[in-house]
Image (tube, rainbow, N blue to C red):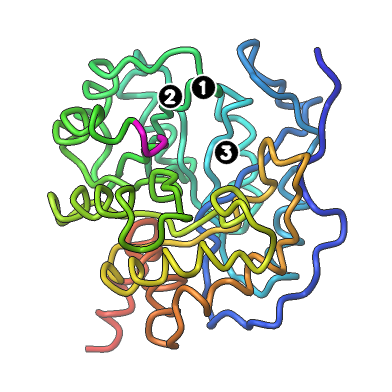
Amino acid sequence: MSARIRSWHSAPSRPGYVPPAGAIDAHCHVFGPMSEFPFSPKAKYHPQDAGPDMLFALRDHLGFSRNVIVQASCHGTDNGATLNAIAKSDGKARGVAVVDPDISDEGLAQLHEGGIRGVRFNFLKRLVDDAPKDKFIEVARRLPAGWHVVIYFEADILEELRPFMDAIPVPLVIDHMGRPDVSQGPDGEDMKAFRRLLDSRGDIWFKATCPDRLDPGQSPWDMFSHAVAPLVEAYQDRVLWGTDWPHPNMESNIPDDGDIVDMIPRIAPTAALQHKLLVANPMKLYWPEELGSRERSSV
């Protein structure tokens, strides 16, 4: 195994921005601990441990209440590390799994019981060896009620993926907006193509995330905020946010999580937008049963 790498800030600053009560970090990961949850033999990177205790300490430090933990590619289709973190969260985390296309209905039911509410299909060739579209569609047709599909891809293959996405019969969530070139601005070709995708279906959501990955500049990532703020405003009922901690594969340009949180009011400048981005929208996808109980109790 290659040397294990660290991709997260060792002492993130405390953000100036204070998230609203109940705010959710809707895109983060855990790594290991490897002694309990080994990496996949196909892993393209081997990070140092970044387990649930570290994640929940960061959550509290940044002022958030809950997490949505997305299965990291280094763990392959063994979701043990993600399920372990959810189990240790005291109900404050839900998850997105990566599954073998041949997973049984019983296996999906067990994941649901463990707090999983979606599956992720990764099309980044530098992270995964293959992405069998036909089998992915078959899995999507068998998902438990209320689940969604998360798709990770880069902007240059968006049009190629359109037929595949059109065939998915459940809501879609697009990681990191499909990695557009934010230097093109809000009216660039990448953003126009992404808006066409969002306009094609009313159940496509997206994550306004990763300024550190998408903006070639340094914090405060002005190109990212300029390009993304109009998108958040236009699709405010279908947008999520997350830290992306512990920032896989960012070891050469590790971001400060406090700076990432301070981007929130720059892409969602009003309290109403911030509440949708951080509370209302992720609750709809990951804790809908709590929304139902709140509505019933207010009658």
Answer with mark 3 or mark 2, whichever residue precedes in sequence: 3
- 3D distance between C-alphas at marks 2 and 1: 5 Å
Residues at circles 2 and 1 in contact by the CB criterion of under 8 Å:
yes
Q: Nearer the viewer, residue 250 or 2?
A: 250
Q: Give the range drawn in magenta.
A: 152-156
33 left or right of 213? right
For disc 1, the neighbor class at 10 Å (few under 14, some 14 to 19, many from 20) is some
Residue at screen point 22% across, 24% down: 137
203 left or right of 77? left
Closer to the camera: disc 3 or disc 2? 2
Q: Mark 3 points at which residue?
A: 83
Closer to the camera: disc 3 or disc 1? 1
Rendered image: mark on residue 77? 1
Q: Residue type at mark 3?
A: Leu
Q: Where is residue 30 in the image (x, y as percent from the top left)?
A: 66, 41
Q: Which of 96 and 234 is in front in this view?
A: 234
Q: Mark 2 points at which residue?
A: 99
Residue at screen point 34% across, 71% down: 230
Residue at screen point 39% across, 65% down: 283
67 left or right of 133? right
- 3D distance between C-alphas at marks 3 and 1: 12 Å
Q: Where is residue 208 in the image (x, y as percent from the top left)?
A: 44, 59
Q: Nearer the viewer, residue 36 or 297?
A: 36
For numbered disc 1, what is the local secondary structure?
Answer: loop
Is residue 153 covered in magenta?
A: yes
